[in-house]
Amino acid sequence: MQVGLGAMHISWQTLDEIDERLQFARQVGVDNVIIHTPELRGDGFWEFRDLLMLRTRVEAAGLKLYAIENMPRDFYDKVRHGLPGRDEQIEKVCMTIRNMGRAGIHCLGYDWMLVGVWRTGLTPTPTSRGRAPVTWYDHSYAENAPTFALGEYDDDTMWVNYEYFLKAVVPVAEEAGVALALHPDDPPVPNIAGTARIFRSTEALKRVIEIVPSAYNCLEFCQGTVAEWCETPEEVYDAIRYFASRGKIKYVHFRNVRGVVPSFEETFIDDGKVDMLEAVRAYHESGFDGVLIPDHTPQVIGDTRWGHRGRAYAVGYIKALIKAVTAYESKA
Ligand SMILES: [Mn+2]
């Protein structure tokens, strides 16, 4: 189990900033990074050479490029929407996967949310520690959202389109040696803007790994999202054990929340409903050997827009938890 840092949106135009963030990651003891939606060149897919350059850039900072998280939405919008042209897009997604494998990048995180991640506020709340601005979601504020531009999508349609995609790409991922890692729907409510959000329960994630049984059909386990749908912390630890013991968790968005859908807020890593020490213990005991990353963090005084201080706090906390659990184990 190692610590990583992610959510670094990069483009070829902002590489200077990226080098600084990579250096920062290394300074606070990070081993791996997950690059979020890199804006590389390429017509609907990523080129081998650009992927390789991305990897060597990360490695030059003393880090490993563990995964790329999220392709541009227009790489597979027709696939997610079930529209004509989806087969051509799937072929290009397969080219991206093959090029990643050739470039030595072995994990691709993705999601299946038609309207993306939603929050209804980024403010201090009555319960946020030190009145830190946190992101929160209260479904009552989202109920009047206008219907998605392409119309309504129900659960069955979403599942059919998803299965079509998964069955086409997993065999290619196996050949390429690139694990596909699905992020659950955040927030995990049944519907936003007329679009069903199918990955909103532990049962749904179990179905995902059963559709195409493969070591390369895996999860980007957003523990924060899982906690958003679990009434109790014990349900979170059980989900960790279920998926980690089956080798299905490639990496973890290791963050904490208060509340449960339809209303929750993000918290500092040590201030939410999940005991993160118990969570790390569950990963460790289940044989998890991937990466924990902080995902997003609350805003603290004097921080940068990207959140250097908040992220450093979370990374330090995660490193200490890993140390505590592994030291505890070796003495037991
Ligand atoms: Mn997440």
Image (cartoon, grey):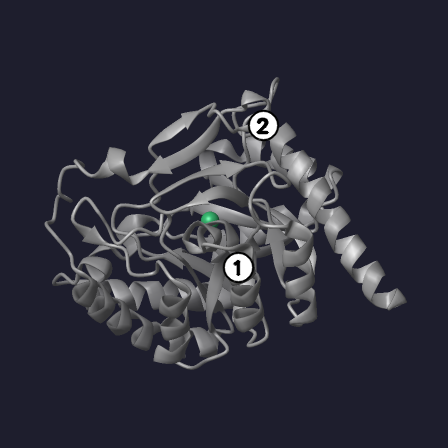
Q: Secondary structure at mark 1?
A: helix
326, above or below 120, in the image: below
Neighbor class of circle 2 (other Cα within 10 Å; few <14, some 14-19, many 20+) is: some
| Residue 300 falls in image quadrant | top right
| Residue 307 falls in image quadrant | top right
Q: Which residue does the numbered mark 1 point to in the structure image?
A: 236
The location of residue 166, given as percent across then percent down, is: 32, 72
Residue located farthest toward the right when viewing the structure as drawn: 331
Q: Secondary structure at mark 2?
A: helix
Judge from the rendering whether residue 223 lies leftward or rightward of residue 332; answer left or right: left
**Image quadrant where one finds the C terminus:** bottom right
Residue at 25% x, 51% y: name it.
114
Instruction: For residue 106, say whether it is visible.
Output: no
Residue at 26% x, 54% y: name it.
190
Give 30 or 185, whichever is nearer the viewer.
185
Neighbor class of circle 1 (other Cα within 10 Å; few <14, some 14-19, many 20+) is: many
Inspect the image, locate mark 1, and give the three-letter code of the amino acid beneath it.
Val
150, above or below 11, in the image: below
> Could you tell me how far apart the alpha carbons at marks 2 and 1 are, in whole angstroms?
23 Å
Residue at 16% x, 36% y: name it.
144
Inspect the image, locate mark 2, and give the three-letter code of the amino acid beneath it.
Arg
Residue located farthest toward the top when viewing the structure as drawn: 302
The location of residue 285, given as percent across then percent down, is: 69, 70
Give 76 or 80, whichever is nearer the viewer.
80
Give 223 or 166, whichever is nearer the viewer.
223
23, above or below 68, in the image: above
Residue located farthest toward the front when viewing the structure as drawn: 232
Disc 2 residue: CB within 8 Å of ligand 1: no
Q: Which mark is residue 129?
A: 2
Q: Which mark is residue 52?
A: none
The location of residue 243, given as percent across then percent down, is: 52, 70
**Image quadrant where one finds the N terminus:** bottom right
